Image (cartoon, rainbow, N blue to C red):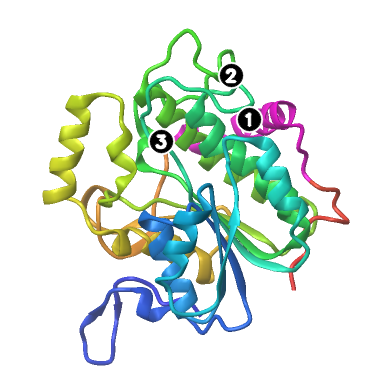
């Protein structure tokens, strides 16, 4: 049974859900993309401490092994470059065991204009398309849930998917590209849940966001003024990476409805205990979600598995 933030304990004090509330995860397996640093590492560490076998899916094996070496419990490290669909396929092709939880955590943020190996705009290609392909390729093995990490940035700016220019060739800004990729994460979760339900699967798709968590993600932003602002915010406003990982952990382990979105409970969803949070109408649009899915299939060459093959859970 889920332990909800704000629940009154027998002592009369309000209980704030934390990693200490994780259930016993012995015998369960989780894949965490980007697990070598930031909230990905914090989530992987907490899951392993709770007894899960955690696979660090990372681009840099040396950094991944160093990170896994700091974690007590059962871990392994496998290479995955979400900006290279061949790497995504290689990772999925070598997976043969049941997988309880896939956490789509890795991401890049507000980069100067760059392209993935397959020619996609880097933020859309990494944050959305890479995880789209990975999820669908692993789905026949997944038995419980998929958690995709989005961001409050899905509310920024245009708040639309630019279907006529997904790579933002004519209108690129680092902020617009990041916001589009995070909106895509939420629409992906919405359509994935619809398809899972239609296939009769018990697997659930959920999304989470960390609020403002102090990680190295912000250090790669293109604008030096924005970068300095992020550094100041990290020092005085942000919660640490362990707190930032709590919404992911909550979504990965608590009994929540499919397509739920979890974030911090504090003012502006910047920090605080994890709870269910809202999203923009654009992030709740089933027509846009279905259209994005079709476009993503065409771009990646990866499709939703047949109903008989889609992970039916256990």
**Residue sitting at x 58%, y 23%:** 120
Q: Do the numbered discs 1 and 2 sit on residues whose CB atoms are within 8 Å?
A: yes
Q: How many marks?
A: 3
Looking at this view, is 155 or 169 the one in front?
A: 169
In the rendered view, would you say 155 is above or below 94? Answer: above
Q: From this viewpoint, is residue 176 visible?
A: yes
Counting residues from the N terminus, which is met first, the one under dot 3 or under dot 2? 3
Q: What is the magenta segment's predominant secondary structure?
A: helix
| Residue named by callout 3 | 154
Q: Do the numbered discs 3 and 2 sit on residues whose CB atoms are within 8 Å?
A: no
| Residue named by callout 1 | 292
Span colored in magenta = 281-304
219 vs 147, left or right, is: left
Q: Is residue 302 magenta?
A: yes
**Residue sitting at x 53%, y 19%:** 162
Label 3 to label 1: alpha-carbon separation: 15 Å
Q: Position of residue 153 (x, y in %)?
A: 36, 36
Q: Residue furthest bottom?
A: 10
Q: Position of residue 206 (x, y in %)?
A: 55, 55
112 vs 302, left or right, is: left
Image quarter (top left, top right, bottom left or bottom right) of the C terminus? bottom right
Q: Which mark is residue 163?
A: 2
For the residue labelled by badge 2, is the local secondary structure a helix, a strand or a loop? loop
């Amino acid at each position: 049974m889920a332990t909800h933030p704000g629940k009154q304990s027998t002592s009369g004090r309000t209980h704030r859900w934390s990693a200490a509330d994780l259930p016993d995860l012995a015998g369960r397996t989780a894949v965490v993309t980007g697990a070598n640093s930031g909230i990905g590492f914090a989530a992987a560490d907490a899951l392993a401490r709770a007894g899960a076998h955690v696979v660090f899916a990372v681009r840099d094996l040396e950094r991944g092994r160093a990170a896994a070496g700091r974690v007590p419990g059962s871990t392994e490290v496998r290479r995955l470059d979400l900006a290279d669909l061949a790497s995504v396929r290689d990772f999925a092709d070598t997976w043969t065991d049941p997988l309880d939880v896939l956490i789509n955590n890795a991401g890049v943020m507000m980069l100067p204009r760059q392209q993935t190996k397959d020619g996609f705009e880097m933020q859309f290609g990494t944050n959305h398309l890479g995880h789209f392909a990975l999820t669908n390729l692993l789905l026949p093995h997944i038995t419980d849930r998929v958690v995709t990490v989005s961001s409050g940035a899905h509310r920024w700016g245009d708040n639309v998917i630019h279907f006529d220019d997904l790579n933002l060739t004519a209108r690129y800004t680092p902020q617009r590209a990041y916001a589009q990729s995070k909106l895509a994460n939420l629409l992906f979760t919405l359509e994935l849940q619809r398809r899972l339900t239609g296939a009769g699967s018990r697997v659930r798709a959920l999304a989470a966001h960390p609020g403002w968590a102090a990680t190295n993600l912000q250090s790669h932003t293109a604008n030096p003024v924005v970068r300095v602002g992020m550094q100041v915010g990290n020092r005085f406003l942000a919660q640490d990476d362990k707190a930032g990982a709590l919404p992911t952990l909550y979504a990965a382990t608590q009994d929540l409805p499919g397509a739920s979105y979890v974030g911090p409970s504090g003012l502006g969803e910047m920090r605080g205990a994890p709870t269910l949070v809202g999203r923009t109408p654009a992030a709740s649009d089933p027509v846009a979600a279905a259209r994005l899915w079709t476009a993503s299939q065409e771009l990646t060459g990866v499709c939703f598995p047949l109903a008989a093959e889609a992970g039916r859970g256990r």
